[in-house]
Amino acid sequence: MTFTHGVGVGWLAPSLPLLGSAESPLDTPISIDQVSWVGSLIGLGALTGNIIFGLLLDRLGRKMCMYLLAVPNMIYWILIYTAQDVTYLYAGRFLAGVSGGGCYVVLPIFVAEISDNNIRGALSSMAMMYVSIGMIVGFSLASYLSYYLMPCIAIAFPVIYLLAIIGLSETPQYLLRQGRDALAEKSFYFYKNLPASSADNESAHHDAAKKEFETFRQQVLSGGVRQDVNWRDFFNWPTLKIFGLNFTLLVSNQLSGSFALFNYTSHIFGQLQTQIEPNTCTIIVGAAQVLGILCAVALVDRLGRRVMLLTSMAGMGLGELGIGLLANLASKEFLAGANWLSLLLMCWVAFIASIGVIPLIFVVVIEQLPAKIRSIGTSICMATLSSFIFVSLKIYPLMIFGPGLAATMYMSAGVCAIGFTILGLFLPETKGKLLTH
């Protein structure tokens, strides 16, 4: 589903020239102002999806919410195919955002609740890996396929997703929260690959599995998950500190340019006089991003969250400082002679951001939050992230086309420095933490 969301995000950039041309499949070509709304409405949709799915997660359960995620995305591709004017695109992009925003709330919690502690970081990091791969696939398909063929192929992805999740069980944590202990026990055995029963119920294997479930059950229930959530669960010093750290992490993620910058790679390469074709540069930078996330998946459960996050933030800040200095101080002759340097620096920023800043936010946010308020807390954090995605998508073009690329990069590097300092001082390591409390 995250791959599907990435395909939807990647579709836009190559499609804009056609939508704004005389050959547009719409009744009239779209204007620059309409382009800005088509681009940014996905952020407002994501904010809506964060809130809706955050409220539904503990009411309908993780599994039902996972089914619902596919519906807005399928409608998005139908609207693109049938679009007659720009309002179809507005509605479609908003619904794509709803689906994506829901993914960032539902799927990280589902994955975290079914994962063993020693692989939870890797599995949770894969969400952003598939988004990045999806963006490259969406960009490539939209670049080479006809406008009407692309939605026909893309709508197959959410259908495959729906078929793939049918055999999955509801998470044992949710079932225990609902008082459905027998189903929770079956689900626990399913995800732990333990024997649920045997011909001889007194067998050592079954006894060991039963004992492990009882220990797990006591740990979950000791977190107060069956009690009603009230304001005191949020307004106490330990929880406020967690929200403060999560807020710092989310703001640093967006205002450091980890998302917005890569929406304007073509213009950045143009300003730095890179001679390589802009679309080719964009695909190369996207590949560097995927490589970084693959490294994160491989290393996060070995090195821990904290060291990778801080390394990523420091490296990203230095890379952006380098691009700013290149834009500010380098002569036209130097840029023409070393046109590969800007591509190398952008690939470095994409790679190092993808080792920690981009993929680990979901892992750290969920691992820090107490079990009792994890669903609502994740929804609040992801709504904050979506709000800052919208803000960053509005701020960055104004910065790049106003004060200029150098000032934009210095601002981004400054955000990295602030985030590095605060998180370096106060962020605890959450590797191996039990999610039952």
Image (tube, rainbow, N blue to C red):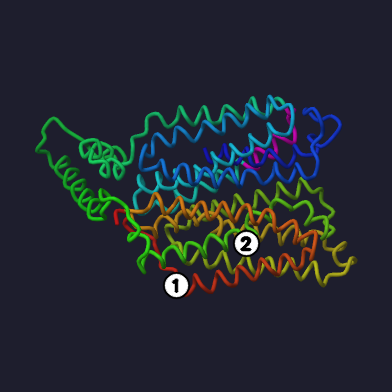
Q: Residue at x 85, y 58 (%)?
A: 273
Q: Earlier in the sequence, mark 2 or mark 1?
A: 2
Q: Nearer the viewer, residue 113 or 56?
A: 56
- The answer to whether 218 appears left or right of 352 in the picture is left
- The answer to whether 96 appears left or right of 409 in the picture is left
Q: Residue furthest right?
A: 333
Q: Which amino acid does label 1 sit on?
A: Phe
CA separation in Å, label 2 and label 1: 20 Å
Q: Which residue is drawn at 20% across and 48% down?
A: 212
Q: Residue furthest front?
A: 231
Label 2 residue SS: helix
- The answer to whether 2 appears left or right of 258 in the picture is left
The boundaries of the magenta stretch are: 135-147
Examine the structure image and report whether residue 274 is included in the region drawn in magenta. no
Label 2 crowding class (10 Å Cα cut-off): few <14, some 14-19, many 20+?
many
Up/down of 137 relative to 298, above or below: above
**Mark on residue 399?**
none
- The answer to whether 41 appears left or right of 379 in the picture is right
Label 1 residue SS: helix
* Residue 430 on image: x %, y %: 39, 62
Examine the structure image and report whether residue 137 is included in the region drawn in magenta. yes
* Residue 84 on image: x %, y %: 73, 26
What residue did someone put label 2 on? 255
Q: Residue at x 82, y 60 (%)?
A: 272
* Residue 202 on image: x %, y %: 9, 38
Label 1 crowding class (10 Å Cα cut-off): few <14, some 14-19, many 20+?
few
* Residue 137 on image: x %, y %: 65, 38
Specify the principal SS of the magenta part. Answer: helix
What residue did someone put label 1 on? 426
Q: What residue type is labelled 2?
A: Leu
Q: Quadrant of residue 141?
A: top right
Up/down of 95 relative to 149, above or below: below
